[in-house]
Image (tube, helix red, strand yellow):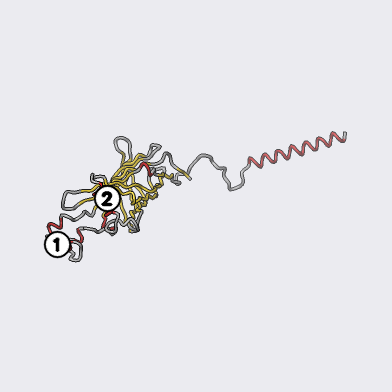
Amino acid sequence: MKKIIYLLILCSAISAQSLDLREQKLTPKKGVMPKKQGLVPDDIPATIILDRRDSILKWKGGLKFAVSNHLGTLKIKQGRILLMKDKNFTGGRIEINMATMTNTDLSDPGKKERLIGHLRSKDFFDIEHFPTASLSIKSSKLIGKTNDGLYNVQITGDLTIKSTTKPITFNAIIDLDSKVKKATGTLTFNRTDFGVQYRAEMHLDNPDSFWNQLRSARDTTKDRVIRDEIEIEFEMNSLPGMLRK
């Protein structure tokens, strides 16, 4: 009889302890909310990583008072852009490898080599000391949509060339809905803002400039003035998908 009573008491104690443990697991601590799985807050941006092998920059520069242009390409070194759920950019950085500069309009190999060598020199971009240029993206604004559903976006950021940084604003047509993001457009910058002043119009009347060394009439010299504006046509493609923290 005593053994039966003892067993009943032991079973009751074990049952009560098990119930208490289950309640502890089911009851959250005060001030702590259960985590919801698979949800990403709206204020956390996704990271778009650019495909440097499938992205290209096409540059254009030439004479100011004569019809003569040179064309070429550049490749990016790397690029990341932060995209919010409302389709706006909140940051990002694209680095350009200046050593990848090529010429595409000249057919003579010797002329190509001389032109690119000059553009890489201290007269222009001095890539030995400044091998990288960069674009830091600060913000963007959706302007509208194209007929084929792409986004017309105004982008604001900072352009850095030869360690000089200037603000820049430009437009791009961007596919933000596909797995691989794609952006196309053109930005224009003034090379003299970045210390690239070779044959710039600003020195045309300076007696100490290279113009005076040409020993030719001013009107003839004007034909050799290089435009201050350089155009960059871009086609950026991302790696598939986006990263989220």
Position of residue 178 measured from the top left corner of the image (x, y, whole percent):
38, 37
Q: In this view, does 161 lie above or below 24?
A: below
On residue 113, which mark appears? 2
Q: Where is residue 129 in the image (x, y as percent from the top left)?
A: 35, 58
* Secondary structure of the residue carrying numbered label 1: loop
Report the amino acid beneath label 1.
Arg
Left of 32 or right of it: where is 159? left
Count of marks placed on residues: 2
Q: How far apart are marks 2 and 1 (CA)?
A: 27 Å
Q: Mark 1 points at which residue?
A: 215
- Expressed as whole percent of the image width and height from the top left, the position of residue 128 reads 34, 57
The amino acid type found where label 2 is placed reads Glu
> For the residues carrying marks 2 and 1, which lies nearer the camera in this image?
2
* Local secondary structure at mark 2: helix
Pick whichever, 131 or 58, lies toward us: 131
Q: Where is residue 214 in the image (x, y as percent from the top left)?
A: 16, 61
